[in-house]
Image (cartoon, rainbow, N blue to C red):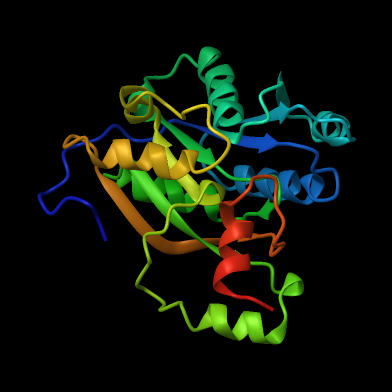
Amino acid sequence: MTARTAAAPSRPRVTRVLVVVPVHDEEELLAACLGSVAAAADGAGVPVDVVVALDDCHDASARLARAAGVRTVAVRARAVGAARAAGIGAGLARCADDPGAVWIACTDADTVVPPHWLRTHRALADAGADVVVGTVRPDPRDLTPRQLAAWRATRVPGRPNGHVHGANLGVRADAYLRAGGFAPVVEHEDVDLVGRLRADPATVVRASDEVDVVTSGRTVGRTPGGYAGYLRGAFPA
């Protein structure tokens, strides 16, 4: 499912992946996230740089990131858009690759990605996508049986709903820069960016359910709304 019906123009093959994880006091979930990202990086087939953007953290998140051996950048914005932008900026600043061949893969600190996550994003990019809007699954351990059944009823395999989630979002670096990057907002930064990317007729956007990520099913998150707010409103206990 693409946002363009015309044949996609030729794109450079991806030669490097930059994974960015924004973090605000996520010591309980961050280690699992970074462990899953490391496994996905092992199977990516190209060099992978991981940057954790520590946004006004006062817990053990910074220590956990250092223990995982990833690069960190510290901000004090209390805004996920600013954190994502800072992480991407730090990663791209040290990257000499053609921006058209660099794939930015975004996820969240309360999310676990599967081992084939980056390999699948790369394949979609190499097939012509500039943006991949991926799907997410709430962690079933956090849901009641009623909530889980209601969520499952919304999913049709092979028919991605096109919902935008920063926990599973990929974008080619040149398209990201052309669109102006993430806005420094406290939520919906992902929807805002994809809206600007879709408005560019030169950008190919693909919604895909070829690879789910599993994100926390908590109903009180780090932003007023976000995925936690969606679960809270759509699937009441």
Question: Residue at left 54%, top 53%?
Answer: 117
Residue 8 seen from this side: yes
Q: Give the position of the C terminus as an image quadrant.
A: bottom right
Residue 114 seen from this side: no
Q: Using the rendered view, name the quadrant where residue 20 is placed.
A: top right
Q: Nearer the viewer, residue 8 or 150?
A: 150
Question: Residue at left 78%, top 45%?
Answer: 30
Q: Using the rendered view, name the quadrant where residue 229 is placed.
A: bottom right
Placement of 80 over or under 180, stated as above or below: below
- Residue 84 x %, y %: 57, 31
Q: Nearer the viewer, residue 79 or 180?
A: 79
For this orientation, the residue located farthest to the left is: 6
- Residue 164 x %, y %: 43, 52
176 horizontally vs 150: left or right: left
Question: Residue at left 22%, top 52%?
Answer: 3
Number of numbered discs overlaid on the protein picture: 0
- Residue 203 x %, y %: 24, 37
19 horizontally vs 25: left or right: left
- Residue 1 x %, y %: 27, 61
Q: Using the rendered view, name the quadrant where residue 107 is placed.
A: top right
Question: Residue at left 70%, top 45%?
Answer: 222
